[in-house]
């Protein structure tokens, strides 16, 4: 988009992640792309306030991944004639960024899709709506939110940025292969994946595969591999956004280990950990806070449980990715490398210690 001659295209590597590639014949060497990329470091907001909370509407709570904070923000924006950007699965179960101008369409954004989303033309669309004086809520990973800020080049009062706590983004190619294998095995099309189905409650979530004939199957191998850090994009493991200073107005995640925080509000079927990172967010929170049960958390402890520094990849990540293009069962491959042995644990600890030493130097 920044390139005046359209010399940049996004090209998929063998792992299935997209990277920019410059067509040297078209390039006029204006260096605009290099300048914008060098600007790609975190522009952090401070004023961080940490809360636990969940929506008062039970139906909404059951449909979201944690406490439904996203949908509360979305409702406010839609009620104020605004536009909401989020990630949905398209008809081929590809995760794509899209926008909605009504609450019904915002429902598609609910539920975490644990895969790198295709940003599509969203950054330009956000800009167009902002210039048109519409209120815009953009939700995405911290790196996507930061990229939008870099793209926009200036602050817009009518933009609300909300990122998810993110510990890695799996490859869309692996998800595609996974879906193809399930479809071949079962002889029908996968219609949707609910990675965070609360059918067995929030704490016992099981990924559900929904087929086009309505059958629902519990299937864990992709989710397990994601949690075991096998699938992330290489840059996720040195992510500059995984820290306590956020690049957005709101940050939303799960309050894992809720039982350890001695809260007055009781978890029912999911509870969000969210932070308020800007004055704009504080003002907005005042307007929506009656929609949720919430409580301020004074300590930093929930951060420390929840990927507020970048994670280490699985020891077998690279071995796994080297095999994904062979004629192999992706499910078996994910299951094989998701198993953590004693040796893996020792190796992991050594790598973690080495990283600590490196970071302290
Ligand atoms: C790849 C990924 C990794 C995550 N890792 C963690 C973690 O380690 N710890 C933690 O506490 N929380 C993590 N989360 C966030 C968590 O899963 C919930 O999304 C968050 O708690 C919000 O819950 P909710 O009930 O408010 O949102 P919901 O109502 O479920 O809405 C989901 C929100 O997530 C956005 N979203 C969905 N899929 C994607 C995607 N692929 N990329 C970008 N945005 C997306 C939607 O646009 C929407 O804003 C992660 C989310 C993603 C997408």
Image (cartoon, rainbow, N blue to C red):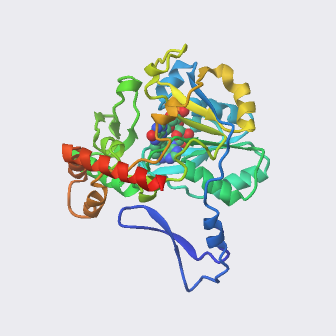
* Relative depth, front residue between 11 and 318: 318
Residue 231 visible here: no
Q: Where is residue 256 in the image (x, y as percent from the top left)?
A: 44, 29
Residue found farthest to the bottom: 25
Q: Where is residue 21 in the image (x, y as percent from the top left)?
A: 51, 73
* Relative depth, front residue between 297 and 186: 297
* Relative depth, front residue between 185 and 336: 336
Residue at image coords 20%, 43%: 342
* Relative depth, front residue between 241 and 293: 241
Q: Is residue 155 left or right of residue 331?
A: right
Q: In which quarter of the image is residue 153?
A: bottom right
Q: Where is residue 126 in the image (x, y as percent from the top left)?
A: 68, 52
Q: Is residue 241 left or right of residue 215?
A: right
Residue at image coords 73%, 50%: 129
Q: In which quarter of the image is the N terminus?
A: bottom right
Q: In this view, does 311 lie to the left or right of 253?
A: left
């Amino acid at each position: 988009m920044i390139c005046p001659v359209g010399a940049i295209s996004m090209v998929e590597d063998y792992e299935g992640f997209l990277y920019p590639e410059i067509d040297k014949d078209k390039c006029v060497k204006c260096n605009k792309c290099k300048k914008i990329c060098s600007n790609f470091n975190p522009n952090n907001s401070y004023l961080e306030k940490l809360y636990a909370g969940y929506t008062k509407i039970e139906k909404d709570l059951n449909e979201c991944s944690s406490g439904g904070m996203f949908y509360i923000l979305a409702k406010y924006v839609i009620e104020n004639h605004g536009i909401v950007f989020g990630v949905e699965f398209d008809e081929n179960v590809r995760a794509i960024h899209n926008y909605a101008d009504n609450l019904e369409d915002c429902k598609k954004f609910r539920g975490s899709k644990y895969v790198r989303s295709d940003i599509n033309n969203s950054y330009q669309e956000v800009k167009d709506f902002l210039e048109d004086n519409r209120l815009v809520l953009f939700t995405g990973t911290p790196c996507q939110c930061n990229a939008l800020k870099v793209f926009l080049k200036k602050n817009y009062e009518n933009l609300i940025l909300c990122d998810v706590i993110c510990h890695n983004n799996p490859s869309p190619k692996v998800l595609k292969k996974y879906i193809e294998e399930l479809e071949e095995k079962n002889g029908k099309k996968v219609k949707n994946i609910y990675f965070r189905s609360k059918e067995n409650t929030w704490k016992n979530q099981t990924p559900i595969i929904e087929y086009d004939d309505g059958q629902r199957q519990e299937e864990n191998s992709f989710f397990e591999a994601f949690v075991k850090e096998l699938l992330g994009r290489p840059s996720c493991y040195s992510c500059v956004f995984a820290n306590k200073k956020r690049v957005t107005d709101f940050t939303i995640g799960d309050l894992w280990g809720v039982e350890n925080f001695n809260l007055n509000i009781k978890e029912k079927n999911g509870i969000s950990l969210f932070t308020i990172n800007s004055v704009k967010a504080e003002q907005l929170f005042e307007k929506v806070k009656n929609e949720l049960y919430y409580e301020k958390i004074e300590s930093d402890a929930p951060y420390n449980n929840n990927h507020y520094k970048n994670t280490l990849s699985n020891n077998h990540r690279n071995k796994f990715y080297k095999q994904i293009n062979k004629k192999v069962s992706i499910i078996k491959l994910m299951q094989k490398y998701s198993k953590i042995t004693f040796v893996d644990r020792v190796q992991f600890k050594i790598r973690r210690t080495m990283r600590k030493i490196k970071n302290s130097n």
